[in-house]
Amino acid sequence: MEAASEGAGRGDAPEEKQQQRQRRRPEEPSGGMGERGAAAAGRRAAAAPAGGGDSRRGAGDAAHPPEAGDFRCHRLQDSLLSSASGYSNYRGILNWCVVMLVLSNARLFLENLIKYGILVDPIQVISLFLKDPYSWPALCLIIVANVFALAALHIEKRLAAGSMSEHLGAVLHTINLLTILCFPALVTLAVTSITPVGAVFALSVHTILFLKLFSFKDVNKWCREKRQTKATRTRSAAGSQKANGNVASGAVAYPVNLTYRDLYYFLFAPTLCYELNFPRSPRVRKRFLLRRLAEMLFFLQLMVGLIQQWMVPTIQNSMKPFRDMDYSRIIERLLKLAVPNHLIWLIFFYWFFHSSLNVIAEIMQFGDREFYRDWWNSETVTYFWQNWNIPVHKWCLRHFYKPMIKKGAGKWVAQTGVFFASAFFHEYLVSVPLKMFRPWAFIGMMAQIPLAWFVGRFLRGNYGNAAVWISLIIGQPIAVLMYVHDYYVLNYEGSQ
């Protein structure tokens, strides 16, 4: 009976439904929402935030009050400036620091212009390289450097051919390498027409040549040792060899690499570590090259202008406090010199390691462009020295540190040896061109050892990074003032 009555009811459904729809229409909102509007309203109600609190709710909402949890607006969390918050987007604060730095230095630069006038003179830069327009000793030293490179190549050719013993080859290489350092130093000290800036440039070229030929000698020696080891094992395996192992077909193998083309590619490449097969980029990117060239020219002019306009007057005004040993004025001069010195050092870093080396690498299609790493994040002194100059770090690691470890030296002894070698070259590039022997650069580099121990032992994180920055900002102008003072006393006050 229930089923029958239900079916009968269903049979009357069309008329009853039509009458029900007619009765419902007056009750709908004036907007005529209909079924689609009701569905949209349902979706909007579902999308409303938990906790409600909307003043536009109808009276019908009171029938379904929000749960107690919907009213919460607090949760467990740290302040943004707390390290536990995990927040790291401080771009706005960094921009603020940059703006403040620009404004403060703009004031100092304007004060300098008002006090001294415009001191920038591009023509004066030429006099830093030449005393006599008919005598170019620095350029002659650079040209003579080719003799040492060709000597190293011919020694290696004789060793590869077996017409020279390994002992004799090692002796000749040692003499050649020592001459690379001693010959330009003796010429600089003997020739009066060479300028300090020209001497620095010539000695830098010879120092780079010394490091490159040292690597050239070592790698070719490793190739000969591998060849002899392979011969003694009587292997007939196919494939050619290089210093790092077997190479694919088409790559240069030892001793085919001993050519003038291979040698001079290495001498001009932006690296100090020799390989038989360098990674090569597929093409020269003209836009990239033009951008780097524009940066080179701009930053070079900027450095020269800042040195002439900002650093030179400050250094000249620092001589009297040094003579009078007025320590308060010395500290004031030191702090005043620290800002332009550090700014010029940062510009030089970008100009040399990013712009200049990328220009050379792009022209030569040299593939490895890792000339520096994130040294600005250094939390230890050791990390800074390992990452700010990657070509030198790779050379020290490959040809100095690891060989000492293999010979049984401890890590601390090997690290000290690396700092000692670096201190020697720093002093070599400063004392010889100035023709005076003051060990300030040597002492400054060796002082990095106890500083590295102290920062690594007692300082961590941001404190260690701040200590590294302070050592860079304060340490360099101290050495600059010491050398300038001694040079001034030796060459000007002593002659009066």
Image (spheres, helix red, strand yellow):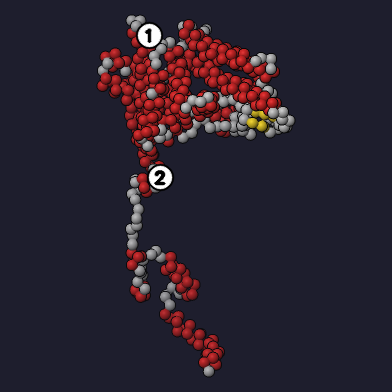
Q: CA distance from mark 1 to mark 2?
A: 53 Å
The dot on residue 491 is 1
In the image, residue 124 above or below residue 279: above
Crowding around mark 2 (Cα neighbors within 10 Å: few <14, some 14 to 19, many 20+) is few
Question: On the image, which quarter does residue 368 sit in?
Answer: top right
Residue shown at the point (60%, 29%) measured from the top left: 366
Residue shown at the point (34%, 73%) measured from the top left: 62
Percent from the top left, x then y, of residue 128?
Answer: 45, 14
Question: On the image, which quarter does residue 276 sit in?
Answer: top right
Question: On the image, which quarter does residue 148 sit in?
Answer: top right
Percent from the top left, x then y, of residue 107?
Answer: 33, 29
What amino acid does circle 1 point to? Asn
Relative to 282, 338 lies left or right: left
Looking at the image, how many numbered discs can be counted on the residues? 2
Relative to 7, 46 lies left or right: left
Viewer-proximal residue among 2 and 287:
2
The dot on residue 89 is 2
Relative to 183, 477 lies left or right: left
